[in-house]
């Protein structure tokens, strides 16, 4: 016999909570998508406790749950929309005691259930469908009651045609916030919110541009809450620019970084950072004068001598094991639009990431063919900007100039740098900071690139200027001679 929507909803909510109690990945996913108000009775209480401690990663056991509910009885007594006060009236106990006992028993049962074979994304979607059906029915019933009589909601009384329409709009706006992590806050009264700085998050510098002092002064380093787009022609140092930024973040600033190394792969990225650190550890930090190693040298195990091999082993150990350094978390997943933000969210929450590099967003793929490549890239850039604002991370992604744009530059004429993006206008329009590197193969052989000013939302334009580069060990510097 088919279950009614309310029965299915309880079944799905049991699966959701069981998966949250037994899987940190599922917990991190679900907690960003559902508000406590979508659950009822024991499940409402269990989820509310986990939601209250989501930033600390606390998962309640029965002792903790008993302590928390005993000290926060209002969670039971003052949530009539989610708690059926007479549900356990036949036990003879008071409402609080009976709910605490039942909730502890429910927690123990859910911890012992095995729903590991269930597809959590599918379960969440089914849950949303049934929740919407039930919620919308209640809202329509309430709107009809207001139209024909009146309805008390909290301290407010609704009555008549206008109130009926208002109630319906308010409740449907609330629905989006309950089951959609990307929903907005509805309507905000600025006479209340305008003087409140409690939710204001100030940007924090988590990396910088190393010896590119001009960029450090111009942008103030690399900060959380900002999207940095590094534009360059193919094979002109944009990925290596990112390797340098990650090395600076983990070594100088001691922060954890996320890296989706879709372009070159994890081993190449690690080899490049080892080359950077060899120079940093001996020449920059200790004042030695060793010849630089390239990432390719390290990747190929091609050292100039045994001495260099042994020296690099020491600097390698310092890079990866020094407790004062941050770590790099490589996201070893297909770069696909369907799960892209989900993977970023999991990594950011689990490892407290402060800088994320995706190399690069123009390679965004898809499991299906619902969107064209251009649409996919545009959506990825927009989703990324929203993610950065929500989680306050610094984000860097390189991108390539369009071939037509390169041809115009090579002619030596004036060009509109705003038109330099590739498949989507979002490549230039969406990031907060656009930094362009340009040079011919001959320029690069002669250790030279040019910085081009591309209009950005948060930075003043600047004149074209040449910089010194050595892409062998990802070195970029102002020219001061």
Image (tube, helix red, strand yellow):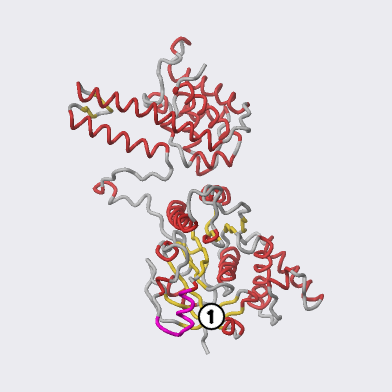
> Quarter of the image holding residue 73?
top left
Q: Look at the picture and state if 197 lies above or below 237.
A: above
* 458 sits to left or right of 194: right
Magenta region:
404-414
x, y percent for residue 358? 55, 60
Query: Badge 1 local density, few (<14 within 10 Å), some, or many (20+)?
Result: many
Q: Look at the picture and state if 123 lies above or below 325.
A: above
Name which residue lies at 54% across and 42% down. Answer: 28
Name which residue lies at 35% across and 29% down. Answer: 136
- Hey, which residue is sitting farthest right in the picture? 306
x, y percent for residue 324? 62, 61
The residue that mark 1 highlights is: 439
Q: Look at the picture and state if 2 lies above or below 429.
A: above
x, y percent for residue 131? 42, 29
Q: Secondary structure at mark 1?
A: loop
Q: Is residue 215 magenta?
A: no
> Quarter of the image holding residue 311?
bottom right
Query: Which secondary structure class fits the magenta region best?
Result: helix
Q: Is 179 in front, or is 209?
A: 179
Name which residue lies at 41% across and 55% down. Answer: 201
Q: Look at the picture and state if 209 lies above or below 31.
A: below
């Amino acid at each position: 016999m088919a279950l009614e929507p309310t029965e299915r909803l309880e079944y799905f909510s049991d699966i959701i909570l069981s998966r949250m109690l037994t899987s940190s990945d599922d917990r991190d996913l679900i907690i960003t998508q559902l508000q406590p108000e979508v659950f009822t009775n024991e499940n409402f209480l269990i989820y509310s406790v986990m939601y209250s401690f989501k930033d600390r990663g606390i998962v309640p056991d029965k002792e903790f749950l008993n302590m928390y509910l005993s000290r926060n009885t209002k969670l039971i007594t003052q949530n009539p929309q989610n708690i059926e006060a007479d549900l356990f009236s036949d036990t003879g106990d008071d409402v609080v005691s009976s709910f605490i006992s039942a909730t502890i028993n429910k927690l123990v049962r859910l911890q012992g259930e095995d729903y590991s074979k269930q597809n959590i994304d599918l379960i969440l979607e089914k849950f949303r469908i049934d929740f919407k059906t039930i919620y919308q029915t209640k809202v329509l019933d309430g709107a009809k009651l207001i139209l024909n009589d009146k309805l008390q909601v909290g301290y407010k009384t609704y009555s008549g045609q206008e109130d009926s329409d208002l109630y319906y709009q308010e409740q449907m706006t609330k629905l989006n916030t309950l089951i959609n992590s990307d929903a907005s806050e509805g309507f905000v009264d600025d006479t209340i919110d305008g003087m409140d700085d409690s939710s204001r998050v100030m940007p924090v510098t988590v990396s910088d541009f190393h010896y590119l002092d001009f960029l450090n002064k111009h942008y103030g380093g690399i900060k959380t809450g900002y999207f940095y787009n590094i534009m360059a022609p193919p094979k002109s140092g944009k990925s290596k620019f990112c390797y340098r930024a990650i090395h600076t973040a983990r070594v100088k600033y001691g922060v954890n970084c996320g890296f989706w190394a879709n372009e070159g792969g994890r081993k190449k990225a690690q080899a490049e950072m080892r080359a950077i650190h060899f120079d940093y550890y001996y020449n920059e930090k200790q004042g030695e004068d060793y010849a630089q190693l390239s990432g390719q040298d390290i990747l190929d195990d091609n050292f100039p001598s045994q001495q260099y091999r042994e020296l690099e082993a020491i600097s390698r150990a310092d890079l990866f094991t020094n407790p004062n350094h941050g770590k790099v978390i490589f996201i070893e997943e297909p770069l696909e639009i369907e799960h892209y933000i989900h993977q970023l969210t999991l990594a950011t929450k689990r490892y407290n990431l402060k800088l994320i590099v995706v190399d690069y967003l123009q390679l965004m793929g898809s499991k299906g063919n619902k969107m064209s490549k251009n649409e996919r890239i545009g959506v990825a850039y927009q989703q990324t900007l929203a993610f950065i604002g929500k989680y306050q991370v610094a984000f860097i992604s390189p991108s390539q100039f369009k071939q037509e744009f390169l041809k115009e530059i090579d002619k030596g004429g004036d060009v509109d740098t705003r038109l330099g993006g590739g498949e989507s206008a979002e490549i230039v329009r969406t990031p907060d900071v656009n930094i362009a590197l340009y040079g011919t193969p001959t320029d690069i052989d002669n250790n030279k690139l040019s910085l081009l000013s591309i209009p950005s939302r948060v930075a003043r334009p600047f004149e074209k200027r040449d910089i010194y580069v050595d892409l062998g060990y990802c070195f970029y510097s102002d020219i001061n001679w």
